[in-house]
């Protein structure tokens, strides 16, 4: 007789009274053939994972995993009918992710995840934690995600993460995985915690080379999460302290950051200081700044630059924001069609437009 349990994030989030995104199920006492016969569709290449015929939710056969190689290679996986729920749960990352719930909503919690939820602790289940280097990032991400609820990483878990870093495990993480976790961490209300935990376990310089997580950057990152949902801005804040455009591009290349993120990060690194002192700039310099961020074709760039810069501001008001917005409005009111109708052609249009935008500003500042 097989038995089905809800496991992982969905049980954790239910117990935390948080919305549950997707359900992961574990099936104990069944074979792949049993599930195929019931119409489940096999999706896991290496692991026995199936999609439910109607709900399409993931059902995995209970399994044990042992690592025989380094990094991601050489997992020995056993998913025989005799594998118990406890055996399946012990190979998981954190105790709060290793709680199961049966069909009658009974909690099965052999590794005391419920206690850890109560005491708000992120704790590894067993030494098997170290078999997957991605877990270093996951712990940092959960620490960021649940920071607002008061969760912290257990000292023993942080110690284990340090040992994994020292053993060189981080080098087995692919850029894609690093970025995926980082992007999820950026979407939390406290992205700075993710980077702080990675720093504490020694992974930060290995993963994000030139990044120096100063208190200033941490504060700015936290503020960015309060000011905007735009993750490209949050990432740009992280990169704003890098010494130049090349350093930003090198970091983005290293972890394969999507282009839209790189663009905003480069823009903020290059022009944040100009915006900071916008009130001291000449009309010509202001137009040059607006040209540099390509605001005419992409008005969103201006908002992105403003919000990213604002996160570094010590005061709550950021007077530069209204100043540059007003300047943009004035410069943008110059009518190109008018210039064309006056007979300007080719490159002359651009020069005349530039000139009139500067004049328009001069009349106002
Ligand atoms: N490297 C990993 C990835 C996953 N898991 C286990 O697989 C479950 C499901 O993983 P996943 O769906 O990736 O994460 P969730 O914990 O559900 O979290 P999220 O809400 O971010 O999806 C986890 O709860 C955990 O028990 C693990 O032990 N080690």
Image (tube, rainbow, N blue to C red):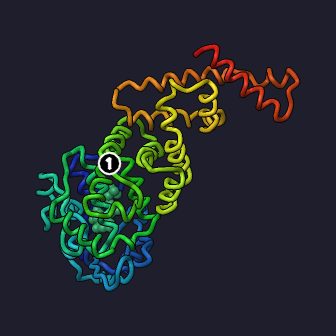
Res 353 → quadrant: top right
Res 24 → quadrant: bottom left
Name the residue at the right extreme.
343
The image quadrant where one finds the N terminus is bottom left
Q: Is residue 188 left or right of residue 361?
A: left
Name the residue at the top extreme.
363
Whether residue 123 is situated above or below residue 193 in the rendered picture = below
Q: What residue is drawn where x is 24% and y is 57%?
A: 11
Near-viewer residue (177 or 30): 177
Residue, disc 1: 214
Whether label 1 lies within 8 Å of ligand 1 gets the answer: no
Percent across and percent down for residue 333 are 67, 20
Res 123 → quadrant: bottom left
Whether residue 50 is situated above or below residue 200 in the rendered picture = below
Quadrant containing ligand 1 reads: bottom left
Q: Is residue 283 left or right of residue 202?
A: right
Percent across and percent down for residue 256 are 50, 61
Q: What residue is drawn where x is 38% and y is 32%?
A: 313
How many numbered marks appear? 1
- Could you tell me which secondary element the residue under label 1 belongs to? loop
Percent across and percent down for residue 289 are 59, 34
> Is residue 104 at all visible to an observer of this figure?
no
The image quadrant where one finds the C terminus is top right
């Amino acid at each position: 007789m097989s038995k089905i349990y809800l496991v992982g994030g969905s049980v954790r989030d239910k117990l935390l009274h948080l919305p549950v995104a997707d359900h992961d199920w574990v099936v104990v006492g069944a074979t792949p053939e049993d599930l195929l016969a019931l119409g489940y569709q096999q999706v896991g290449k290496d692991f026995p994972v199936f999609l439910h015929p109607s709900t399409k939710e993931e059902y995995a056969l209970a399994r044990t995993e042992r690592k025989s190689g380094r990094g991601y290679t050489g997992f020995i996986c056993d998913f025989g009918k005799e594998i118990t729920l406890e055996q399946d749960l012990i190979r998981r990352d954190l105790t709060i992710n290793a709680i199961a719930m049966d069909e009658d909503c009974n909690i099965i919690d052999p590794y005391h995840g419920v206690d850890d939820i109560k005491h708000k602790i992120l704790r590894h289940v067993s030494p098997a934690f170290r078999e997957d280097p991605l877990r270093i990032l996951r712990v940092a991400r959960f620490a960021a995600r649940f920071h607002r609820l008061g969760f912290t990483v257990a000292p023993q878990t942080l110690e284990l993460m340090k040992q994994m870093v020292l053993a060189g495990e981080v080098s087995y993480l692919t850029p894609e995985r690093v970025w995926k976790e980082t992007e999820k961490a950026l979407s939390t209300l406290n992205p700075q915690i993710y980077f702080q935990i990675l720093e504490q376990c020694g992974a930060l310089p290995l993963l994000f080379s030139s990044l120096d997580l100063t208190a200033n950057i941490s504060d700015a990152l936290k503020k960015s999460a309060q000011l905007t949902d735009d993750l490209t801005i949050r990432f740009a804040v992280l990169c704003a302290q890098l010494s130049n455009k090349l350093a930003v591009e090198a970091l983005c290349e290293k972890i394969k950051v999507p282009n839209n993120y790189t663009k905003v990060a480069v823009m903020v690194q290059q022009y944040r200081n100009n915006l900071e002192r916008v009130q001291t700039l000449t009309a010509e310099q202001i137009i040059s700044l607006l040209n540099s961020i390509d605001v005419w074709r992409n008005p969103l760039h201006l908002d992105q630059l403003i919000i990213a810069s604002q996160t570094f501001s010590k005061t709550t008001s950021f007077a530069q924001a209204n100043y540059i917005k007003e300047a943009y409005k004035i410069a943008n009111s110059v009518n190109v069609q008018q210039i064309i109708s006056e007979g300007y052609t080719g490159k002359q249009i651009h020069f005349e437009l530039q000139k009139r935008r500067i004049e328009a500003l001069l009349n106002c500042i």
